[in-house]
Amino acid sequence: MESNEKAVLRVLPEAIRTLYSGVSSLKVSIDFLNEKVIELERSLEELSKLTAEYMDKFSKDSQNLIKALEDFSEKSSKDMGTTLDLFLGKFHRDIERLISTHEELLGELSSIRTIIQDKLGAILEVYSDLRNEVLTVKSLLNESIVSLGDLSVQMKANYSSLTSKMHELELLITDLSLRIAKIEDLIEKKE
C-alpha cells in the first residue's frame, strides 16, 4: 500500500503540470479566436461603410449626370430631345434599380453584421465561462500542489517517526530478551 501511495505521489505532480499546461494552451487558443472574431467584425464594418460611401457617391454622380443630360436635352433639337428623353428614362430606371440593389445590399450587410455580433456575443460568453473555469482549475491546481507538498512533508515526518519508534521497539525487544535470558539463568541456578 505504501509503495502505491509513493507511486501516486511521484506521478501526481507531473499529471497536474500536464493538466495546467493543457488549460493554459486552451486559454491561448481562445484568446487567439477572440482576436480573429474582433478583426472580422471590424472588416465587415469597414466593408459596409465603404459600400455605403461608394453607393452614395455613385447615386449623387448619377443624379448629376441625369440632370446634366436633361439640361442638354432641353437645349438640343426636338428629335434629339425625344431620343435623349428615351435614353434618360431608361437610364433613370437603371439607376433606380441600382439604388434598390444597393439598399438591399446594405440590408444584407446589416443582417450579417447582426448575426456576427450575436455569434461574437455567444463566443465572448463562452470565452468568459471558459476563462472562469480556467482560473478555477488554476486555483484548484495550486491548492492541490500546496496540499501535496503538505501531505508529502507530513508523510515524511510520519515515516521518520514510525522508523524511530520501530527502532525503539527493536531496542526494547532486545532488552526484554536479555532480561528474560537473565531470569532463565537465575531460575536454572536456583534449581
Image (cartoon, rainbow, N blue to C red):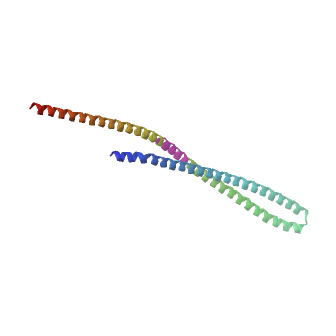
Identified at 62% across, 52% down, the residue is 36
The residue closer to the viewer here, 115 or 182, is 182
Q: From the viewer's perspective, is 45 left or right of 130?
A: right
Q: Indicate whether residue 126 is drawn in magenta.
A: yes
Tell me the quadrant of the picture where the C terminus can be found.
top left
> Which image quarter: residue 171?
top left
Identified at 35% across, 39% down, the residue is 159
147 lies above or below 18:
above
The residue closer to the viewer here, 130 or 96, is 130
The residue closer to the viewer here, 123 or 36, is 36
23 lies above or below 58:
above
Magenta residue span: 125-140
Query: Residue 109: horizontal and vertical position, in percent?
Result: 66, 55
Query: Residue 110: horizontal and vertical position, in percent?
Result: 65, 53
Identified at 39% across, 48% down, the residue is 7
Q: From the viewer's perspective, is 58 left or right of 158?
A: right
32 lies above or below 172:
below
Q: Indicate whether residue 141 is drawn in magenta.
A: no
